[in-house]
Structure formats: C-alpha cells, structure tokens
Amino acid sequence: MIFGGSVPSFKIVTPSILLAALFCTTLAFAEGEKLVEIRIEGNRRIESAAILNVVTMHAGDTLYGDKTDSDIRAIYKLGHFQDVQVLKEESDKGVILIYSVQEKPIVRETTFEGNKEISTEKLKEALEFRQNSVFSSKDLAKSVAKIKKMYGDEGYYLADVQTQTKKSPTGDLSVIITVIEGKKILINEIHFDGNKAFSESKLKRILETKEEWFMSWLTSAGTYKEEVLKNDALLLADHYLNNGFINIKVGEPSIKLNEEKTSLDVFIGITEGEQYRIGEIGFKGELLEPTAELRKKLKSEPGELFNRSILRADIGVLTDVYGDKGYAFATINPQTRLDNEKKIIDLTFDIEKGELVSIERINIAGNPKTRDKVVRREMRITENGLYSATGLKRSKQNLMNLGFFEEANIATAKGSASNKLNVNVDVKEKPTGTFSIGGGYSTLDGFIAQGSIQQANLYGLGLKASFSASVGKTSNTYSLGLTDPYFLDTKWSLGGDIYRSEREYTDYTKRLVGADIKGGYPISDFLGTFLMYKYEIKDIFKPSTSYTAFNTVDPGNYPVGKSTTSAVSSSITYNSTDYRLDPSNGMINSLSAEYAGLGGDNKYARFITDHTYFQPLYKRLVASTKVTLGYIMDVGQTIPIDEKFYLGGIYSLRGFKTRTVSPTNPATPKYGDTIVYLGGNKELYGNVELTLPLLSEAGIKGVVFFDYGNSFSDKSTIINKMLMSYGYGIRWASPIGALRLEYGIPINPRSDIDSTKGRLEFSIGSMF
C-alpha cells in the first residue's frame, strides 16, 4: 500500500478520543465485575509481558473504568503504539479484559532518488530516524527540512524534496526520498542601504558571504548560507563599533530571488548614527596599583576613536592584573558617560577585587602514558599558592610546546571554600614516537635512503631519544642521541649525541666522527641558556684538481687529511613565540659563541646572532622576518676551510646552489676542473616570509618569500654585494617530519653558477 505526499498520514487515535470512546464503553461495563484474565492482542514485536508490566489491573481485581483509563495512558507512554483500545469479553468464570494494540510501523529501508550533487551517504546524515526504528511523521518532516538546508548551503536554493512510503504486508515501511535538485543559484550582488562612513567594497570585504565570480566553482563564493549571513550582520556591527559608531544598527539581511530565478540578491540595511571618540579615562573602586600604572597597561587612548574590541582587551588586561595578584574573581566594570555634543565617551573602570583566592588541588587527566610530574613541572601555578591568570595561560602554552599533546585544556572548579579553586588539567596525548624508513630526494644530497627512530617522550618521562641514518649518492649520516630536559628532576637539561657523517662537496669529501655532551638551564619561560662540548675527528680527502692545485701553492688554506676539533659552545635564547612548534606571533632572539682550542688540532672562535620575528596580519596570514649575522676568527692559526660560512640552498638563500654563496679562489671562478669555494669569515642573510594555511586539517601551508644575504672574506665589507631571491612553496607537517618544497628565483644571479630560471628546493626537517 502506497501513501502519497510529502509526509504519510496514519489513523492515530489520540488519548482524548480514546477517553471519550472509553467513557462510552465503560458505560456498558458493569462496575464492580471481577476480572479473571487480562489479555494483550495485536502486538507483534512488543512482548505481552512488557505491556502488562505497565498495566495496573490484574486478574482478581474489580473492574473500574478509571483504572482502564489509566492503563491506556500507560500503554501509550511506551511509545510503540499508534492505537490502543480496550474490550470486554464475558466468560463462565468472569470478565476477560482485552487491550487491543496497533503497533507503530518500523522503517526497514530508506532510499534516495534524484540526488547527484550530494551523496546518499551525506544525505543519510540528515535523517532524524534510522533503519529499524519506529516511524515518525515529525522526524520525516525534520529530515526533509535538513536535506533542503543541505542543498541550500550548496547553492541549490530551489531544491525540492518529496517523500513517499511503501507499506509491506507485515506493516513495516520503506521510505523513498526523491530530490529535485534544480539549478545552482548563487548570490549575484550584495546591497547595502544607509552606509555613509564605509564604501560598499569595504563592507563586502568584512563579510564571509561573497558574491559569485568566475572562480566560484572552486571557492564556493556566492553560496547563500543563512547562519553565515546572520553572522555577517554581527561582523558588520563589530566593525562599526570598533570605529566609534556606538549606536550602530544592522538590520537582518534579506534575500530576493530574481525574476528569472537564476540568482539571489542580498539586502542589508544599516543605521550608522554618530561617530564617537574617547574622552577621559579614569579608575575607581579597589585599586591595587596607582592609576598611572594601570593607565599604562591600557591600549585605549583619549582622542582615539572608540573601539569596542580594544575596550574588551583592556578589560582582559585589568582582569589579569588582579588575577596575577590572586584575585580570581575581580570584576572590571567599564562605565561610560556620553557627551553627545562633543561626540566623546568618557570611560571609568570600576574595579572590585573580590576575595584573595588560592589553588587547592591540581588534578591531571588524560595522560595514561605521560607521568604526572611531566605535566606538573610545566605548570606555572602551584597547590596552596595564589591564583594567577597569567600562570594558567602560560601553563597551557608550556604543555602545548612540549609536543606531547593534541590538546591541553585547563579549567578551574570550586574548591572546598569560597576562596579556594581546584585546577583541572585535561590533556589528550598524541603519538610521540616515530619510526620511518624509506627513500627520497634532496637538492643537496640527491637520492637518499633514510630511516629513523625517534621518541620525544621516552617512558613517559619526557626523555628525548633518537636514532637516524641516511644513505645517499653524495652523503651518509648516522646519529644517536638522548636528552633529559629535567635532569634528576631539576631545571637543568642534560644530553649527548654520537654521530658519523660523510659528504661529497664539489671540491672535496669530508668524513666526520664525533660526540657531544650538552646541557641547559631556563632562566625563565622565555629565556634559556645552553652549553655544549664536542670532540670530532674529521678527514678531508678526494680533493678536486683545483683544490689540489691550490693546496700545493698554499697548504695552510687548503688542508687535506685528518684533524681533530675540541670545542665548547654556549648560547642564550629569548623565545616569546605563541607556539614553538609552529609560531604565528612573537620573536626568537639568540646569541651563540663557540671556541675550538681546548686541545685538538683546529682552533677558531665563532659568534652568531639570530633574530626571527612573527606577526599575524589578517586572519590566518602570518608574516615573519629573520636576520642572521655570523663571524669567525682565527685563534693563532688558520681557520679550517670547512668551518667557515657557506650560504645557498633551502636554509639560507633559496634559488642559489647549496654551499656556493661564499668567496671563491681565484677571483675569476674557473680554475682547473672545478670552482673552489673558500667560505667566508663573515655572513649576513635573512628573509621575509608570508605563510597561509591551504589545508589546515592536513597541516599544509603555502609560503611566499624574499631572501637576501652573502658570506664575505676579511678583505670585503659586509654589504659589499648582497645576493637576493624570491619564490614560493608548500610546507607540510607530515607524519615523518616537516616537509618543505620551495622554488627560489635569483634576482641577481651569478654568471656560470646560478640558473636564472630558479631552483626547486626540497627538505624534510625543521620548518624554521
């Protein structure tokens, strides 16, 4: 049997009708008759025992109409029946009471027809009912509405959804949903009415909703989404409030389908009002610092346009000032006084500090692997210590910087008293151990086979262990390392590495075997120190013809054979970035010094300063700039050629060949069969980058860059000649490490060395 229409109808006896019918029926009942049996009829799926369980009358009871009324209601409440009737049957022994039920139909199958733009699997997610569930016409109507919305969100604004049900002989249903998709309808134009202070083009840039254009098939621009458009009205209001229009009113956006039913127009009404500036700024209430000190912490300035977002930020700053002194429940109430003639707003921050609050307990959850102490040592609040707003924020940042967790959520909860809080730390661990083996291609080493085992959280103690090996056409490297960032549960870090490498350069091959021991101490969360001692045995062999010729003339500058290096180095680093694994805000400043000469054959002193700054620009667009200065000096003997500065390649000057940006010998590069790159005593290089997420879920970013720099000899000035390049690329936080694929184009290429068409650079390693 087929029921047509959008929503099938069934004959359902409502309780009120049943009661009326029951009332008439019970008139025929002989009040006070004795029941000998109560029977259930008509049920197929629902067992009689389950129904009788809610029936209050039993065999042996006296029949009363009000009790049968109550039993019918109870059976209806089970939710399985669309009709319930009560019947009486006489027998020799007495009265038999029969509850005759009609079960609601079950949906055994749901099929979709006509859908091409949205998959059946996706449409099934919109269903309010599931297979083998009780059919509900309300649920079917809700499902139709959700499916229409799904099509509307894809631009199929006129899509029609029709439903049909088929009833099987057993009473079960098959639901057929037919979609008439129609043509895609996009927003042709967005109209504003009442805007004077800002142009339509400016306001359109604020909206998330966009007009259609020739690339709409790729960007989805022009698609109408009701929730997005409503939020756009709030974005417009925020923009006006952040520019002094305190009485702004943005009407609810309306849409209109054109006569041809091919596109939509959006209309947004705006009442701007007058623009106000900030007048006097004052404070009152319970002040913990002089007003002059509080005033310095605010971004709001007299004479500037009133900006609601800055006001909110100022409230947050003042809240943190009090929170850092233990007043967790301080109230900052900004009071305003308007001067409608002068169009100014006077601000007064009324402050109530509340109670002094201490931390009672720190509870940690979600860390089955990581030891509690690893989490606790990153916390910047302590049990029985005063509450600190900045401490809580910094604790979360520290936990995320570990790289052990996908999420780290910190929340406060009421303690045993009004002036005590518990802190709940809920982390979600992520894999910190990796094993990889495979092959790849490096612009420096050619084709390579590589394998590595790394564990950043060994035994859940935060120990960092690694073993890696790579074998390529021009290089082989092996390394083994272990570091404890909190040695013996102190703030000192201690670690060591052993390594071996062999690499072919254009003018010689270098083999290196070495080991180091290193340690560090954090002065603060932002400032840290580092100290390392290393001992290396190196061998320079297989010199090129040119290198051999130069070595014959000047062997001191062109060494061949084995030598040893015993060196100590130290550094101090200031890092204020928001997320150290992938920064978007803050800076990194470091200064390092290395001295070789504590024994060994080689002697030199090297100094490097490095500065990187990150700044978010617009939404997820991040700008960064980096500059590095280096200087190496001799200590009683010639500086080893391989210890000097060589630039070029993906980690310094992209677009220029790796390790070729350095002084050469002779001045005209060609001599013998190859160029000999001497390395520089000084280096200066840097870059400016813009990064933007392309696929945030996959960790893929796009980057454009500008590089500059050079390395110099003692006889040249540091700004003698700067090489420059520009380019673009893709970065991916892949499961085996940060991958970089970037194309650099030299602006001032060197003849016979650089390609004017640019170079493709590839690496797997640290992103910054």
Image (spheres, helix red, strand yellow):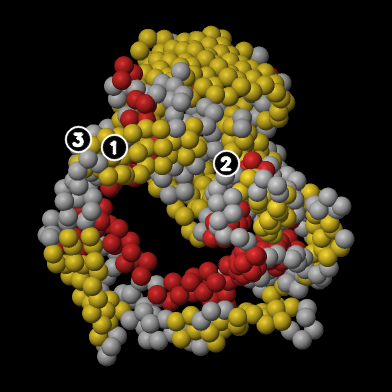
Quadrant placement of the N terminus? bottom right
Q: Quadrant of residue 296?
A: bottom left
Question: Quadrant of residue 609 in the image?
Answer: top left
Q: Is residue 30 left or right of residue 624?
A: right
Tell me which residue sits at (80%, 52%) in the image. Answer: 172
| Residue carrying label 2 | 653
Q: Which residue matches tag 1?
A: 380
Point out residue 99 in the picture as x, y percentages from the top left corner: 67, 53
Q: Earlier in the sequence, mark 3 or mark 2?
A: 3
Residue density around tag 3, few if under 14, some if 14–19, many if 20 or more, within 10 Å: some
In the image, is residue 43 above or below residue 481? below
Callout 2: helix, strand or loop? loop
Kind of element beneath mark 3: loop
Q: Look at label 2 and name its amino acid.
A: Leu
Give the CA separation, mark 2 to mark 1.
40 Å
Q: Can see residue 546?
A: no
Name the residue: 30% across, 34% down: 362
Depth check, mark 2 against mark 1: the one in front is 1
Q: Nearer the viewer, residue 428 or 66?
A: 66
Q: Residues within 10 Å of mark 1 (few under 14, many from 20)?
A: some
Instruction: Report how far apart the C-alphas of labels 3 and 2 lie in the structure.
Output: 53 Å
Asked whether the viewer can see residue 41, the reply is yes
- Kindly identify which residue carries mark 3: 384
